[in-house]
Image: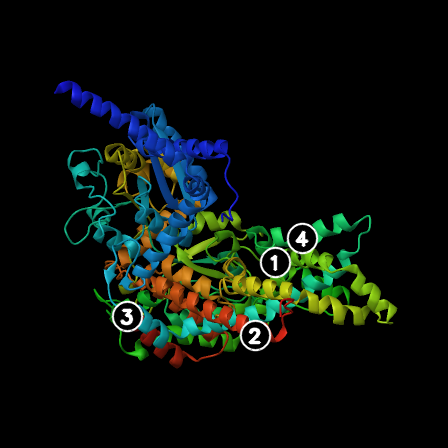
Amino acid sequence: MKLAPRFAPWARRTAAACAALALAAACAACGGQDSNDAQAQSLTIAWWGSQGRNDKQKQVDDLFLQEHEGVNIDGQFSQYGDYWQKLATGAAGHQMPDIVAMDLPYLNQYVGNGLIQDLTPYIDDGTIDVADVPDAVLDTGMVADGGIYAMSSGVNAPAVIYDRTLLDSVGIEVPDDWTLDDFTDICRQVYERTGTKTNAGYYRDANVLEYLLRADGATLYSQEGLAVQDPAAVEPYFAMFQDGIEEGWHLDPTIFTEINLSVMNQDPLVSYADNAHRSWCAFGWSNSLGGMQSLVTNGDDLALAPWPSDDVSRSNYVHPAQYFAISRDCANPRLAAQWIDFYLNDERANQIMGVDRGMPANETMVERISGDLSADDLESIAFVQDVVTPASSTINPPAPAKAVKINAAIMPSIQEQLLYRRIDAAQAAERFIDQAGGVFNQ
Amino acid sequence: MERITTSAADGGDARTAGRLRAFLERESTAGVVCALPFIIGFTMFLLIPMVLSLYYSFTDYSIVSGPVWVGARNYVTLLTGDPLFWQSLGVTVMFALVSVPLRLAFALAVAMLLARPTPLTGFFRVAFYMPSILGGSVAVAVLWRRMFAQDGVINAVLGMFGIESHFSWLGSPATAIWTLIALSVWQFGSAMIVFLAAIKQIPGDLYEAASMDGAGAWRQFRTITLPLLTPTIFFNLVMQAISGFLAFTQCYIITQGKPLNSTLFTMVYMYDTAFTYYQAGYASAMAWVMLLVIGVMTGILFVTKRFWVYDPDR
């Protein structure tokens, strides 16, 4: 006995025909992968940044296209955190964009797994002209095997971006050389006299801690793990948060649950006018000055100071703002190299970008474009050239790959527990050593 | 000699063609072909990824590098050395335990109201279903965050009733999870539709007989509607509980687990582990433990079934 209804013959034949068609379509799709000329002449470029950066980048790309007819550029930008998620999945699927932005914490990982190409051949044959790029800047893209895998798009420096108008109004001056105690003193004074609170780099990575450790010649990471073992060494940093919340001058942690800190226009320095939410400063990088200033609504002038440290000149460093690298999946690396060269050495491109990705890596450009730059961009360049460069030390080697979890989860979470007053600074220091060390055993 | 070979070949061709024809005309061929879209989809998007993730769960796999076999290490770390996983599991279980019954109660109540045909019933059904379509979206999640902000709509409405409030709903560990539960309960539409269909299946003469015996509306609901709906409630409970355990968007967009990880869903922790911390092997292990947890939970629900679900065959 048959339970299933019989298929009519036409239905069977239709089904068979459909199957044949589907197979044929699948085969055609597989065969369609042959790269033709049109495809080879396209460039996909991915980076992190804001809409403002995207607008500038688009103009640079258009200029490049005028010189390279028949080429097609697809620019893709995301927020910092999302960018690395997209890039990793692209790498796993062998579909990375042709040119990718790189950052120091990720450089070794991408080089080590063969995901980005050595630029040395293109530098040697002149495709990428580095004559005007200082060796110190060029070397930041060099890895252990001596190859240069990433080209710095420009340099910046750690900076406290602060509301100078507000501080002037109460007669407080921020020095170019200040200790952590000076910083907390100013926080207290600003709070007492104006009611404005402080965001002391809350819910952020371990960069500030690493900066403070450099004052004593210590590093946060060794090649393979956490270099710091003594909780006492990291406690002063956490004590700052504890003092801030106990004395009332640090912003309440609840306001950070309502904003997205990776978006510049939600930063407490610029996005609020009321004292419950507003901060007089932000821990960031020198190249953000122009962007931050453009978001200020009350007309206040922002200015730059180094991050505080017991020894600023030992702590401070010049830092590659963002790198460009050519990915393993790039079909036309020569064209990609030409684009990097254009970005680096074309005067118009430099005029457009200004210091958006840091002070231009090409030294001669700084002077040539200075006439076109905004006051904030000039201020940012002067900060790197006159304040940081004379009083700084060589940047630490990149952190081990697993440090990403410390920056993205462990450090923010400990700062959070401090500000919610679940733990004190001593416990925070112990937890940090314990949990950050544990990451490397996972 | 040559002729013989040729004719044998001819015969062979004819036989092959005949066999192909017979194969195409066979019923099982048509069945398989019709099922092919599912089979291909299932294999490519479910079976292969699952097998791969099972393999990855025994490796150290950073996505950007190749997987390296580490045996059961990921599982050992997960079960013995990762308090955050247990924290997130606790949050997820709490979220599911509270939001699913609330959502079902809501869905049933609204379905009862909409069961009676009136001129506007169609409109209301669509209107009440709407949140189910919108509620999982990023736009609503962003909206939700604004609503519960210190200067948001909720505090403004409280202010209208004379309760001046600058309370941070999202910033307080005690209340943040409830904003997510509220959003989840609001998405009661699909359960409501299923209830609505089941309510219409209940024979009218039961109610007729009951009202003749003097049973009021509440009693009718308790002794007729509710018992006859238990199979539907069970179905909804299982489906919604599973989706409760898999909740992701609300946490990912609205709270990111903040504050103090009080809203960190396991799915978000897993996602971050794989794609932010680049520990895809460890995240895969997490996924398999979650599968086990959900399996056990569903199993328990099925065991309780015979105590409270109406079964006409028994």
Q: Earlier in the sequence, mark 1 or mark 3?
A: 3
Mark toward the viewer: 1 or 3 = 3
Q: Chain of mark 2?
A: B
Q: Residue A107, relative to residue A21: is it above or below? A: below
Q: Secondary structure at mark 3?
A: helix
The answer to whether any part of residue A120 appears in the image is yes
Q: Chain of mark 3?
A: B
The percent coordinates of residue B251 (x first, y second) are 52, 62
Residue type pointed to by label 3: Arg
In which image quadrant can residue A333 be found? top left
Task: Estimate the spatial distance between the alpha carbons at disc 1 and disc 3, rounded to whole Å.
Answer: 40 Å
Of residues B242 and B47, the one nearer the viewer is: B47
Q: Secondary structure at mark 2?
A: helix
Mark toward the viewer: 1 or 4 = 4
Q: Chain of mark 4?
A: B
Q: Secondary structure at mark 4?
A: helix
The percent coordinates of residue B24 (x first, y second) are 39, 34
For the residues beneath circles 1 and 3, the answer to whether they share a chain is yes
In the drawing, what numbered circle is on residue B304?
2
Rate crowding at label 3 as few (under 14), some (14 to 19) or many (20 or more) other CA atoms within 10 Å.
some
Task: Estimate the spatial distance between the alpha carbons at disc 3 and disc 4, rounded to whole Å.
Answer: 45 Å
Residue type pointed to by label 2: Thr
Residue behind mark 4: B129
User: Which residue appears at 35% of the width and 71% of the height?
Assistant: B78
The percent coordinates of residue B161 (x first, y second) are 77, 67
Left or right placement of residue A193 versus residue A145 in this view: right
Residue behind mark 1: B144
Q: Earlier in the sequence, mark 1 or mark 2?
A: 1
